[in-house]
Image (tube, grey):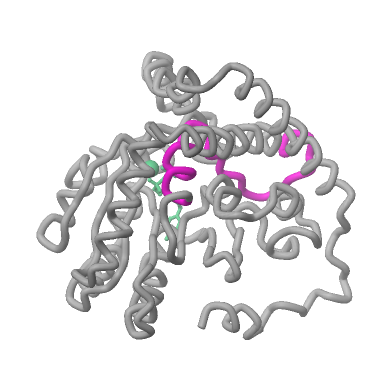
Amino acid sequence: MDMALIEDLYYWMLLGRHFEYAAKENYFQGNISGFLHLDIGQEALSVGAMKAFEGDVFTTYREHVMALSRGMSANAVMAELFGKVDGVSKGRGGSMHMFSPELGFYGGDAIVGGHIPNAVGCAYARKYQDKKTGCLVVFGDGATNCGGFFESINIATSQKLPLVFLCENNKYAIGTKIETVSAFSKQAKKVEAYMPTVEVDGMDVLAVYKAIKKAGEYIKEGKGPIFVEAMTCRFEGHSISDANKYRSSQEMKKCKELDPLTKLKPLLDKVFVEKIEAKVIREITEAVSFANASLEPSLADLNKYIFTNEGLKHAL
Ligand SMILES: Cc1ncc(C[n+]2csc(CCOP(=O)(O)OP(=O)(O)O)c2C)c(N)n1
Ligand SMILES: [Mg+2]
């Protein structure tokens, strides 16, 4: 067992968990406004995938923990939630727009499924540039009902693009049960005719890490895309404004029994856990202070960063 890896994954999941607790608290204190989609419960998927994948990443609106694991500082991600100038998107985007071309992290996207064709475009570019690492696109089960998803799997397959499709199947699209809107409850069924598919326990960080590592190796071989379906469970409502009334207490109890942090903890040394918990609390406290102290964007800068080629410098 690679203890260094297990410790690292645990640290990032714990950081993510406490980041989200702080985000929730600050939302209700009025320090954060707009949308807020918490990743509590789904950290194994976010951390496992980000730590395993080497290429460019496109993801959904539930992306704080992915942004952190990818290398954005907790200070800058929290400041973005607060809408402050030191945020990763200079306070202009908020929760759904953590974006860093330098880190190969192209959002955060508010449009369900809207980022999937973008990832196809990126994978096309990477193939053209002979950049083997390719791209990873993460999306919810609900996004697999979008037209753009089907067009994307078709183009990615026909062009043999280096693209990992990672579906976070938490069985709900906001409060809509998957069975009521999707032809299949396992989304891989929609993809099997196009590319290899793999199912993984999305509540097991090591399983996700290994599956995405393998998928990353697969796309480097130039054989085209691959689809990974991670079965997961979110502990909160879809967003901060969703009271989660559509799931029974029994269902929530079962879901929380799968807590990825609880699963990993017994493998770790007690002293390490205590040390890491203290470190995480320090870092999150510091992130909230940083975000509080950072300034609001100035009115004079209102038209700045609207049209820019700055990001492209890193992407090309
Ligand atoms: C094109 C588009 N249609 C509808 C919405 C509203 N919407 C936001 S999230 C969501 C459900 C998406 O499914 P999934 O990713 O499985 O949801 P989650 O698991 O995050 O609740 C919908 C319909 C949107 N943001 N964009
Ligand atoms: Mg879902």
In this view, 68 is above or below 219:
above
Q: Which residue is drawn at 54% across and 40% down?
A: 239
Q: Which residue is drawn at 27% across and 65% down?
A: 219
In this view, 204 is above or below 86:
above
Viewed as shown, does residue 315 lie left or right of 156?
right
Q: How many marks?
A: 0
Viewed as shown, does residue 86 lie left or right of 64?
right
Q: Which portion, as a residue range, is magenta?
A: 27-50
Ligand 2, by image quadrant, is top left
Quadrant in the rendering for residue 153: bottom left
Q: Which residue is drawn at 58% across and 53% down?
A: 67
In this view, 129 is above or below 278:
below
Give percent across and percent down for residue 13: 54, 36
Question: Considering the image in quadrants, where does the N terminus appear?
Answer: top left
Pick out the residue farthest to the left.
Answer: 193
Give percent across and percent down for residue 54: 44, 61
Viewed as shown, does residue 122 lie left or right of 33?
left
Quadrant in the rendering for residue 147: bottom left
Q: Which residue is drawn at 74% across and 65% down?
A: 90
Is 205 part of what is drawn in magenta? Answer: no
Give percent across and percent down for residue 224: 22, 69
In this view, 178 is above or below 55:
above
Is 28 part of what is drawn in magenta? Answer: yes
